[in-house]
């Protein structure tokens, strides 16, 4: 529905589009927005009709961070039951747990948790015109939504410290230096570029292969080379005797779109 805090659409190619939809608030995070975003990420993970995901914002911002309409109570958790129910995760099913490619089409400003949400995605395309930052240390708190993990593993300690310990806001042209962006484009080009990447992967990349590779990519920084080799071997053993390992080469040689048979929901390794 148009008045929902997050919109969802799925096209014929299996590309799901998730749109943060509070444009009058620059998509600032409310509890409802975060709950719905987590629920939609979970749906994308479980639904085999979804091949890839693009997350973006309505209007001129991606997400302006916490809703500070009542500034003094921005970080007050008393209405939600206090610290017994509090988690700095913000979202109960983050983008990096979705077993599909998730592309962030950061169409404008991403501040605070808005930037943290973008950093959870696999590929990030930012608008040149936007302002970006994990600014929470300037608000009396600190980075959230797994940002101490996602940012560090993406850009290294020195750049992560510059982003998170200064709380600075950066312009789009600085993102290449910081290493947080796959591409920085004029805002009008951000969503089309993200959708093109998502469409190409949805058609040409085997869903189970993507899911296994994504899991290993996100976990590999915590593993040694021997453990990575063991998992790569185990995952290959899981897929090499199955139909997609035949279909992929055949489709390539015959210069046609592949017809993938394996599905994440039913063919995921049980161990």
Image: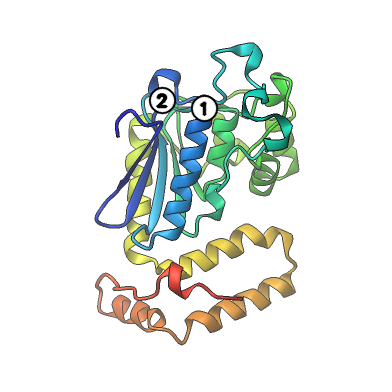
Q: Determine the CA span between mark 1 and mark 2.
A: 9 Å
Of residues 253 and 115, the one drawn nearer to the viewer in this rendering: 115
Q: Is residue 65 above or below residue 159?
A: above
**Pointer 2: what residue?**
22
Residue at horizontal 62 percent and vertical 24 percent from the top = 79
**Pointer 1: what residue?**
30
Residue 78, image quadrant: top right
Res. 183 visible in picture: no
Q: Is residue 256 above or below residue 62?
A: below
SS state under label 1: loop
- Quadrant for the N terminus, please: top left
Res. 133 visible in picture: yes
Of residues 216 and 50, the one drawn nearer to the viewer in this rendering: 50
Of residues 62 and 192, the one drawn nearer to the viewer in this rendering: 62
Q: Are marks 1 and 2 in contact (CB under 8 Å)?
A: yes
Residue at horizontal 53 percent and vertical 30 percent from the top = 31
């Amino acid at each position: 529905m148009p008045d929902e805090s997050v919109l969802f659409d799925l096209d014929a190619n299996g590309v799901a589009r998730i749109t943060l939809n509070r444009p009058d608030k620059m998509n600032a995070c409310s509890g409802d927005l975060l709950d719905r975003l987590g629920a939609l990420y979970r749906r994308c993970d479980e639904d085999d009709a979804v091949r890839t995901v693009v997350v973006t914002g309505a209007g001129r911002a991606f997400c302006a961070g916490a809703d500070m309409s009542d500034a003094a109570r921005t970080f007050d958790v008393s209405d939600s039951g206090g610290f017994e129910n509090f988690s700095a995760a913000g979202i109960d099913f983050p983008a990096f747990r979705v077993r599909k490619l998730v592309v962030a089409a950061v169409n404008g400003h991403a501040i605070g948790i808005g930037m943290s949400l973008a950093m959870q995605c696999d590929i990030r395309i930012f608008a040149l015109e936007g302002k970006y930052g994990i600014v929470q240390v300037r608000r009396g708190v600190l980075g959230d939504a797994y940002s101490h993990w996602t940012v560090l593993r993406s850009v290294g300690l020195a750049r992560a410290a510059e982003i998170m310990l200064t709380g600075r806001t950066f312009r789009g042209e600085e993102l290449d230096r910081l290493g947080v962006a796959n591409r920085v484009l004029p805002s009008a080009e951000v969503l089309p570029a993200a959708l093109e990447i998502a469409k190409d992967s949805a058609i040409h990349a085997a869903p189970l292969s993507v899911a296994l590779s994504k899991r290993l990519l996100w976990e590999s920084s915590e593993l040694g080379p021997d453990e990575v080799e063991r998992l790569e071997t185990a995952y290959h053993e899981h897929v090499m005797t199955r139909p997609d390992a035949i279909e992929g080469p055949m489709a390539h040689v015959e210069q046609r779109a592949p017809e993938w048979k394996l599905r994440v929901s039913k063919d995921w390794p049980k161990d």
